Amino acid sequence: MTNDITFEQKLENYADLTIKLGVGLQAGQRLAIRAPLEAAPLVRLLAKKAYQVGARLVDVLWHDDALNLTRIQYAPRDSFDEFPAWHLDGLRQVVEQGGATLRIQAADPDLFKEQDPDIVAHVERVFNAHLSPARRISMSNLCNWSVIAMPIPSWAAKVFPDDDPPTQLAKLWELIFRTCRLDQPDPIAAWQQHMARVRLQKDYLNAKQYVALKYTAPGTDFKIGLPTNHIWHGIDAQTNSGITFIPNLPTEEIFTMPHSAQADGVVSSTKPLSHNGVLIKDFVLTFEGGRIVKVSAQTGEKTLRKLVETDDGSSRLGEIALVPHSSPISQTGLLFYSTLFDENASSHLAIGKAYRFCLDHGTDMSDEQFAVAGGNNSLVHVDFMIGSAEMNIDGLMRDGTAEPIMRQGEWAF
């Protein structure tokens, strides 16, 4: 168990798992890492592991949230369309040339809480526009990629507000280690067993080819269509060249893409959404004909509205994900203030861009063909949680009959 292993060994195991199973890095590949400045020690360890498996080059795109905050506070108000495009051009070049990417997530959930949401949304829109070419490659699984997390003091303080700073960081590290199955004697073997279990569930859903899902829970009465030849994925993924990787560590979800024009009803959030340094709480979205037509939130409503208004596709859905309420992350009973973790505690939906690999031959389609098939395109892709122990989900067949998929938040098949 983790208590019998030193912190340094756990960190070694984390880096090993990330490079070998998360990124699935191959000998001869380049690796581009996007990381905050606070992650420098972890980045150096990851680079060592990458070179040990045969990486040609490991390069890092550093960022600093405090510097981003300073810009929003003090930069000229007419300067927010400017962007250092060379940052993301380098990332795009790596993936276009067959390299791999890794992003380390570590952010203050309240970073932009006091800032003008119009400016924050504008800066995000400009960033996403420049990131779009590289994101399209990764969201089509044309390269191997992964996202992991690392605690920083401001994030740890949000998750464990009643503890002193050293304890906050130690507790958050332990949660990351545990939810990434690093408390197992052989973490890589534990992940392989996890993947085998999920493959059985994916195979079941893919064989069914439901035409729609029906969600029922307190505050939620919602029906969403599924495109013909949709594909359920989960845990691991595979590039066109056959490289297996795990996009998110940790991960518990099984997901596919919805039909962008077939969402009707009301969904209520069951966990807050931390977006752009603002916590959006107790929000409700109303859909008609696939589009969000009404938004309300107890807090952060303006930020949520700005998200939905980003572009034509940001008022539609790009992902459906199923997660049992008994998932290890849900059982912690904690809100992580990080989508990477909170989405794996709850069934969820995503506003915005759809993953092309969730449709048969979707990665070969033009934008127009993908849209006709039901795929959504957007600069954004933002998950929000709607699952709970009171959630029931049915799969609808072509003849109109319904079959249980989840009951009280747990698998029903």
Image: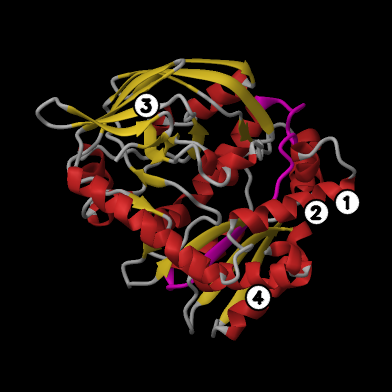
Which badge, 4 or 1, comes first in the chain's sequence? 4
Residue type of the residue flagged with mark 2: Ala
Q: How far apart in space, not on screen, are marks 2 and 1 (Cα)?
A: 6 Å
Q: What secondary structure predominates along the stretch shown in magenta?
A: loop
Q: Which residue is drawn at 42% across and 28% down?
A: 408
Q: How far apart are marks 3 and 2 (CA)?
A: 37 Å
Range of residues picked out in magenta:
96-117
**How far is mark 4 from mark 1, CA to CA?**
26 Å
The mark nearer the N terminus, 3 or 4, is 4
Image quadrant in which you'd find residue 7 = bottom right
Q: Mark 4 points at which residue?
A: 47
Q: In which quarter of the image is the C terminus?
A: top left
Q: Three-letter amino acid code at disc 1? A: Pro
User: In the orientation shown, which residue stands out farthest toward the left?
Assistant: 399
* Residues at circles 3 and 2 in contact by the CB criterion of under 8 Å: no
Q: Where is residue 332 in the image (x, y as percent from the top left)?
A: 64, 42
Q: To which quarter of the image does residue 125 belong? A: top right
- Mark 1 vs mark 3, CA separation in Å: 41 Å
Helix, strand or loop for disc 3 = strand
Which mark's residue is nearer the viewer, 1 or 3? 3
Circle 1 — which element? Answer: helix
Disc 2 crowd rating (10 Å Cα; few below 14, some 14-19, many 20+) is few
**Residue 100 is inside the magenta segment:** yes
- In the picture, the disc for residue 170 is 2
Q: The residue tagged with tag 4: helix, strand or loop?
A: helix
